[in-house]
Amino acid sequence: MSQFYFFAFPHPSIESIKQIRRLRLSPEDSLDLVRERLQKAHPNCFDDLETVTFYRLPNFARARYSLREIYEWIGKRDAEASLADYDPIATLFPEGPQPPEWIDIVVVTHESKFIEQADTLGDPYGNLRHMKARAKSSRAAGSTRSPSDSVKSFAAIKSTVLDAGGLYYGRHDRFGPHTALFNKELALLKYEIDHPEQSIPDETILAHAITFVQTAAKFFDGEITRESQLHPMMETLLGSKGNWQQPTNSQSAKPDVVWSEEGFACLIAEIKNEQGLGGDPFLQSLVVYKKFIREKKYQQSLGRSNFPVILLAIAGDRLVVSTAIFTDSVYANELFTMTLRLSTHFADDVSRVACLFMAVKQCITQLRKLYKNLILNAEGVPPARVLWPNPTADPSVPNGTERMKELHLEFFSKLDRQGKPIINQGGLNDEDKQHPMYLATMRAEDDSEATVVLVKFATKYNEGAHRLLASQTPPLAPTLHACVRVIGDMFMVVMQYVSPSDGMALADIPEPRHPNADAVRPHISKALDLLHAKEFVFGDLREQNVLYLSDGRILLVDFDGVGVHETSRYSVCLNIEAGLGVRRNQIMDKSHDLENFERLMRRLSPQ
């Protein structure tokens, strides 16, 4: 005999009056049926309902329905309150539904959880919107094909990368900051791979590495045969068994092998019999990773992890090791590429492979601890923190780690190329994704009031030139709090943040309010004199790099390209449309600054 049950379905896109649903269920019906009915009633929530959790709510009156109270209750009794969506309703409620004034079950989607987190997020620059955009990105189709079909033709590869929900790994201007900036485990893997001389493999590991290289260099009649030969060697070198040819829960992917912990992938490997046959195994492993993120377990942990993973691609005798994360999109970086051939340098190659697998093995161990803690400690990562960098100081730089800890940085927003906070993370264009500039709070050891700072990551930075101008009275550059080399081949530069209300770049000031040449000439002239006295060449003097403050002072910014007179060279990728009057890779000269200074003054002078 069917009976009515009351369901609370809190969701941002549903009117409050419709968040209580009265559904008739038969004893044999499961909660999967409830999901299907809600999907039909609310098609705009279809994807959200693919990954929901059902909770029993005893004695919670509909008359005082409060989302916040429901979540507080669930937080205290999460384990025993959740219901299996495949069990029949008669098993879940053997005595039938509660009285009609009570809610029987609440349907929790990850979108609902973001509402719960709104207070803790603080939302200084739209973090709630950022998290919701991240959830939407995780469910974006990207490639609707299987991973193997996604790499078998040019059209499939192009759509896999460029369509909505595509991948960022350096194709067609689709790239972002290095994955090492966002996860310590992946950062240390990169460092170990970049410094193999710090690892000394023992005789056993070297013996397995010899066999692995010799086997990879062979020809095999089929891919399955190659996999079967490499299978035991990889498990031996990595010190644990992987799951071979095991489909994902949704059957959307069947990776060659996955090393995982608590259902989260630590390493995904794809093997091809030869290069060019069957597609690119690296891209295929990246598509597999994208498919994993759509799985229920990943969706339920969106607010607490950026899901770091190692990608191992083998195509014949070619070995590629990469890493990937998921923040606002999927990003990947290649760490190591090697051809495994029998040559006169065989001994060196074997040693390199042995050190490589030692580093990967150690990283898998660390990722397993991370994912185990993710499951055991539900409150281990603050909401929305997974969107922002978590840089690791380069161990080869003295005192780098200590200096990093002293800063007590907490990132909370990304900036666009003009230095303005990006309000809608879901609206990031490819250029903003590439640009590693953020806002963070910096707190002193005495736990005093936090200071908002600008943090940029640059491949090179002239700390000396910046500090020279920042130390003047009044300053001619923003205060420089730190310049620390971090893993990812970058410098983390922490400086004073000048908000748009306190100052703007000359390029952004509208014409009626634009200062004339006389207002800025003495300040810029003094800055150049100071730099040139120390043999520095600023190299990029234009409106974009001159901040005009509300009190009439100016600050020079962007010291990435500062060089040494008659020694340094301009970038080989110099923007020739910037009108600096210099050539790519040209030797830098103080006279270039003076010429650009006069060009700037002419542009600012009244016509």
Image: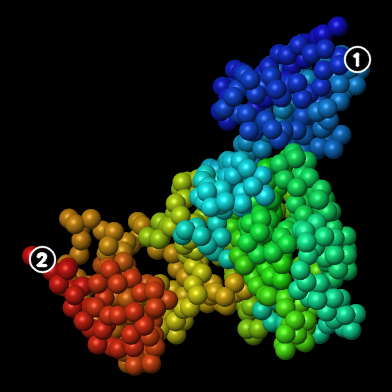
Residue drawn 78% across the image and 71% down it: 218
Indicate whether 253 appears above or below 464: above
Indicate whether 94 appears above or below 583: above
**Extreme-left residue of the structure:** 607
Q: In this rendering, does residue 523 appear at all?
A: no
What secondary structure is found at the residue carrying circle 1? Answer: loop
Which residue is denoted by mark 2 in the rendering? 606
Quadrant assignment for the N terminus: top right
Residue drawn 86% across the image and 16% down it: 28
Which residue is denoted by mark 1 in the rendering? 95
**Extreme-front residue of the structure:** 221
In percent of width and height, residue 592 lies at 26, 84
In percent of width and height, residue 83 lies at 83, 30
* Label 2 environment density (alpha carbons within 10 Å; few <14, some 14–19, many ≥20): few
Indicate whether 461 appears above or below 291: below
Residue drawn 27% across the image and 64% down it: 506
Q: In the depicted view, which residue is nearer to us: 484 or 473?
A: 484
Q: Report whether 190 appears left or right of 388.
A: right
